Image (cartoon, rainbow, N blue to C red):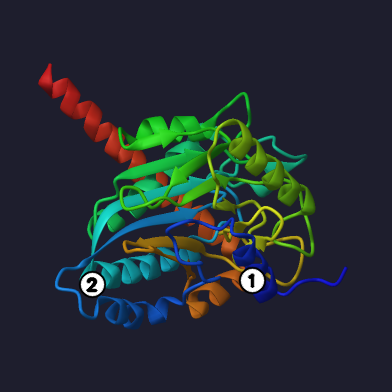
Amino acid sequence: MPQLKFEEMRDFAIRSGQLVEGVKIPEPSVHPHTVPMRLLQLRKGRKRKMRVTITAAISDLHIGHEDFLPCTLFSTIDNLVKVIRQIKKYCSIVQFNFVLVGDIVSGARVYKDQYIDNIINKEHFQVSAAVQVIRGILNRLDSIRKVDEVIHLKGTHEKEGNNYTLLIAKLLGPRHFYHGRYHILNIAEPLGTYNVCFFHGFGRSDYYAATLAEIREMQRFYMQKLTYHKIRIHEFCKGHSHWLWLGGVDPANCFYWSVLGGFQRWKKTMSQRRPGMILYVYLSGNPGTLWRIPIEPDPDVYLAEIENRKLEFSNHGFYESILSGYFAEEATKEENYLRSL
């Protein structure tokens, strides 16, 4: 059977009549630079600001590893902030979700000889460093628009016996929720319905952003939820492969799938996989409009970091600085507590 092009698969899905009711057919991706112009076009003739929900998803930081890319991560967050500022300028953001789709820390004893690649080998120090990094990201986002809900999912580097993700969520406070291996989130709530199933992923492919085993698992899970729970999953969003990919579609079951990029230098090949995160924007209307916006780092920052021969030494200094800040903060809390007695 000849392989269908994306446009042909999308047309097939439209003709099948199984696509999302009340939502325009999502585009594969919307370039961040076109967001202001598109918002201006949509706002024409409206007296009030459009109401929108936004959901930012990120995965595969691998904090504690020697090949973590902190500058690439923070450049990506800077670009996310720029896009959210543009959205806030033209729209009223009624809900802001932030989803951490697994492998936030590098973990320990996940694979043979991992201790050689880890700079931080003690898991509790990895958790402490992750808490500082995530808290810094959220503080930056909160300065633009407060994040309402933060969802934590387990990846492949969080061992069953030592659930670092659960611990990170508990340490970060009340708006942080742990949801295990997967979570189905209505990213359009309260304006509409668009269910995205976030899960970390598994397996490995040198050729595809999602393995065939993962796509089969998506199909099975889609039918299971639709048949037994009457829940329609409109899109799957996964991590694991460190390969930013938007707008894949399954013509048989009519769901979309997207893949998040990673923030770790890829060791297995000389070429590097596409880093970054995804911002989902749902704009109210009849029908509503869904945008997938790829948020990537500045190329100069990313290229300089992956070519940095001293990345391991740089990360030694980075981990030392954030852990020093964390322990200083804990010491201050202890002093304040003792004074209050």
Between disc 1 and disc 2, the foreground one is 1
Residue 134 higher or lower than 49, as above or below: above
Can residue 193 be seen in this snapshot? Answer: yes
Residue 172 higher or lower than 267, as above or below: above
Residue under pointer 1? 11
Is 16 on the left-hand or right-hand side of 337? right
Is 86 on the left-hand or right-hand side of 160? left
Residue 335: x and y, percent?
Answer: 20, 28
Residue 117: x and y, percent?
Answer: 67, 49
Where residue 39 sits, quadrant-wise, is bottom left
Quadrant where the N terminus sits is bottom right
Q: Residue at (32%, 71%) from the top-left corner?
A: 82
Query: Judging from the image, what secondary structure is the residue with disc 1 in?
Result: helix
Give the residue at the far top of this rendering.
Answer: 341
Residue 314: x and y, percent?
Answer: 52, 61
Q: Amino acid at mark 1?
A: Asp
Is 318 on the left-hand or right-hand side of 4? left
Q: Residue at (58%, 51%) from the top-left corner?
A: 236
